[in-house]
Image (cartoon, helix red, strand yellow):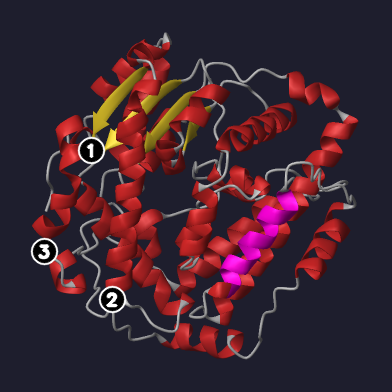
Amino acid sequence: MASAETLNLDDLTHPVLTDTQRQILAYTESRAVTFDLDAMVAEAVSQAGADDLADDDGFADRLAAHVVAIESDTGLRQLIRSSLHARVIRKVRNRLSLVDLLKHYPEIESIPIERPLIVVGMPRSGTTHLVNLIAEDPRRRALPYWESEDPIPARGQGPDVFGVDPRFARVKAEHEALMASTPYVAAMHDRFPEAIEEEVELLDLDMAGYVLEWHARVPGWRDYYLGLDHTRHYAYLKKVLQALTFLRGPRTWVLKSPQHAEQLGPLMATFPDATVAFTHRDPVAVIQSAITMMAYSDRLRRNSIDPDWLVDYWGDRIHRLLSACVRDRELVPAERSVDIGFHHLGGNEMPVLTEFYQRAGVDIPPKVAKRFQAYIDSNRRGGKGRIPYDLKRHFGVEPEELRSRFAFYFDRFDVRPEI
């Protein structure tokens, strides 16, 4: 795909399916997926070879609420129901395997997670680009997508005779299937197996992440998630990071997740010596980008697109997230944080990256600086095709009408209107 190619989204909200997409749906829709929680847990136990869920903090209740939320969305096709069914089993299996690992190696919980660098910001605000850039520093431990999806190997599970981890192979196969079914995803947010992703998937081993909102229409889960005491769930996240450090080292992590923007208290309580980079972008551009990506994916996930619902839900969701971020920004010490406007992430990242490292008290040797610049040069926006985002055309909303809700955010940070 040429870097300058503009992709066609004329059918975004009234999709015209390809032959491949129709064949996929014809096959998957004929196979109904049921969410029998006991059967799903039993399958996870069978895969893990262990049966202790460490349910001393209400995990079973959170798991049940998660499944109820999925079932409450009656507009899902069987394709995404099958994916979510497998995801729940995978999360439970990983939790079981973590408990089993900690029983055998209790010293894991003494491993320090020292002075992490953490990227925080809205979805679609450059967090993925920035964390992948920092991950070019070979001194840093990062979380590739394949590992975020399946972090803890099951007992006895290891690389095959060719040295390929079966967890990597599974995620690679899933990515290839995704590219075949919805190829424009690569230009929106390409989660190829080696790409550095976010630890919200690790939080969902504890059923305490907001990520389900990206897969299904689950306002009930949003409210349930926001009502949790996330201090204990971030402590669980640290435990998973300790296990990953034990399994594959080292312990100087670079992390990122938009979820952190509304959980700054728990984040800093868990990682008090962290240095945090906040990315900031026009919320209207964020919403436009997010709901365009959602609408495109929904052609296979849902029975209908419903653009008005996407505007209303994600406009509100981003407002909630930013309100919490503005409220709690001062919980992160100024001397160990930077605020980075999206306009600084278009090829001129080195100055802000240098400042971030200075705040962290870390040097950038010439070899590392060279790696940073090579990544910047090779990952310009639009390199996998340009998406014709158009809030007015596709969703019938005037940008200024939506932007008026976010004056509090523009007043607080260096944010420039984009559309």
x then y, percent, for residue 325: 34, 35
What is the secondary structure assignment of the residue under circle 3? loop
Q: Tell me, yes or no, whether the highlighted magenta stretch contains residue 63.
A: yes
Q: Residue furthest front?
A: 227
**Tag 3: amino acid:** Glu
Q: Tell me, yes or no, whether the highlighted magenta stretch contains residue 214.
A: no
Seen from the viewer's position, the closer of residues 114 and 219 is 219
Mark 2 and mark 1 lie on one chain; the one further toward the N terminus is 2
Q: Which residues are magenta?
A: 59-71
* Residue 114: quadrant of the picture: top right
Q: Which residue is mark 2?
A: 12
x then y, percent, for residue 279: 30, 35
Q: Which mark is residue 342?
A: 1
x then y, percent, for residue 122: 34, 44
What is the secondary structure assignment of the residue under circle 1? helix
Seen from the viewer's position, the closer of residues 221 and 158 is 221
Mark 1 and mark 3 lie on one chain; the one further toward the N terminus is 1
